[in-house]
Amino acid sequence: MIDKLIEKIIEKRNPSVIGLDTQASYLPSYKDIAGNADAARRILDFNKEIIDATFDIVPCVKVQVAYYEMYGYEGMKAFAETLTYASSRGLVTIADVKRNDIASTASAYSTAFLGKNDLGQTAFASDFMTVNAYLGIDGIAPFLQDCKEYGKGIFILVRTSNPSGRQLQNLLVTLNDKMLYEIMGDYVQEWGKELIGKYGYSSIGAVVGATCPEEATKLRQAHPSVFFLVPGYGAQGASAKDIAVSFDGKGLGAIVNSSRAILCAYKKEQYAHLSPAQAARQAAVAMKKDIGAALAEKGIDYSSLTKGTRE
Amino acid sequence: MIDKLIEKIIEKRNPSVIGLDTQASYLPSYKDIAGNADAARRILDFNKEIIDATFDIVPCVKVQVAYYEMYGYEGMKAFAETLTYASSRGLVTIADVKRNDIASTASAYSTAFLGKNDLGQTAFASDFMTVNAYLGIDGIAPFLQDCKEYGKGIFILVRTSNPSGRQLQNLLVTLNDKMLYEIMGDYVQEWGKELIGKYGYSSIGAVVGATCPEEATKLRQAHPSVFFLVPGYGAQGASAKDIAVSFDGKGLGAIVNSSRAILCAYKKEQYAHLSPAQAARQAAVAMKKDIGAALAEKGIDYSSLTKGTRE
């Protein structure tokens, strides 16, 4: 699955992801919403408009399940249909669900997002999902199994973008004098070694916050086969320069998420004359340019990226 | 909310939880199931039978969402209705969802299980939910807020019951020469200090596996106000003696979960003449006795527990 993502990135010449964290309050029709079912329908319609306006310029969408769960099972129906619609438009999909459990329970989660259940049906079919590995390999093995069986991928939380991520993730562990996030990075690289594709990256990736460029730099150097999903650009304050450290010398190795700045672009003065969908498109174009410029400063010419095997 | 749970425990003289991890394959009618919607309906019916057969002897149910997510949004409807039905029978409910994210996303998760959304509606209303704190206080604060506002509680993963929990949780951290799980325990106690009820326990509790009696002993001593949710009894191999260390000298401080051994009791030879519901009841009675005997060995007379303020 990582090869498919990388080829979409190369094809669109754009390593960015639109995060469909669509809260009801983001919708122009927010005040007219009557209950959970209505909210779910309107959120789905809004998502489809955003997808229609951007699918030709971005390779991937990330759908944050929390905003759908808060509208109950009807919200979850909109979550499933958003993923299906994005796939139908040729986008790679990431279910941002941060699931974690052990053994048969982890297997049930994996089934829900990556595989097929015991009735042979899918639930919330996605290409990738995010996973929390605090429980160790017992909680990861079932996902690895489905990644192999169904050609899917996962991103494991390594260093999150929030300030208090450091409370646990930056604790210094006596083992090898490393911080916890570095040990998590070591595990991610180890767990993913059987799923490395033709570009040298594994379908078992890592979430590494844009707001932690120092940690990202260390992780990029230490874990050459781990692809990064990078949150925190834009609304959380990280710049394109901060995210450039997550890329390799060829312009691969990371994909950068932006949610609110895209979905709510229509609320900004500069885009106020546009529809939400058209404003989202303009914001997505601006983000692509911003990242491209930061990579160009590192000597990476994104427009020259080509598909094919890397050594 | 912790006071309500403790009073139900005292009232039933039973510190055990039935885990409704109802996989379709647990149902007698498994082979007749036609698709996700049918699976969801049958799982809900099965859960109601189990609840009807046990609500007078157990204080609490824990519903593991992974087994509902794997049947899509229809499964999530069954999840919501299982929680509602259990509440209607007077049971305390724990949504075992292990959610984790930051800021507004954590807030959306908290809304989904503990609070009300921006339309004033609930989604999967529960008394407690389980939470993963790898992201630090940013990922916990929104839940604390809802615990205060709505009188709810959470259980934070501290030391999980699976063997590979040690891969991260038992790493020795240079800070104070403690292991990661001990530091997580310290945080849980600190985060919960404003939510301590009249029995001396906080509504911010910890998940501490029955399979780790050494760690549980340390945590019980170090964190007197942290209530434990204890998985791993039965199917995962922990005995009642292993779980006794999680209780305080008065027989409080922990609630013990059993899922498969209750739900699938009807498949055991000794209960083969009973319906699934009646077999579940017998297994729940046996579990209560088993735990009671282990506590009696510690000198705790469970039958003498009374409600009222503890010093």
Image (cartoon, coloured by chain):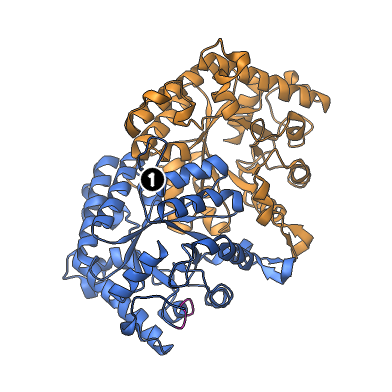
Chain colours: A orange, B blue
Q: Is residue A54 left or right of residue A305?
A: left
User: Mark 1 = which residue?
Assistant: B69
Rendered image quadrant of residue A134: bottom right
Q: Residue furthest top?
A: A273
Q: Is residue B247 magenta?
A: yes
Q: Write the residue at 55% across / 18% down.
A: A266
Rendered image quadrant of residue A255: top right
Q: Chain under label 1? A: B
Q: Is residue B6 above or below residue B48?
A: below
Q: Is residue B102 above or below residue B263?
A: above
Label count reads 1
Q: Is residue B23 left or right of residue A4?
A: left
Q: Position of residue B212 (x, y in %)?
A: 53, 73
Q: Position of residue B143 (x, y in %)?
A: 50, 51
Towards the viewer: B86 or B64: B86
Q: Write the residue at 25% across / 53% down.
A: B85
The C terminus of chain A - image quarter:
top right
Q: Position of residue A258 (x, y in %)?
A: 61, 30
The segment highlighted magenta reads B245-249
Q: Position of residue B70 (x, y in %)?
A: 38, 45
Three-letter code for the amino acid on which mark 1 is drawn: Glu
Q: Counting other residues with Cα less than 10 Å from the Cα at mark 1, is it few (<14), some (14-19), or many (20 or more)?
A: many
Q: Is residue A88 visible?
A: no
Principal secondary structure, stretch drawn in magenta = loop
Q: Is residue B299 visible?
A: yes
Q: Is residue A157 magenta?
A: no
Q: Is residue A254 above or below residue B115?
A: above
The secondary structure type at the circle numbered 1 is helix
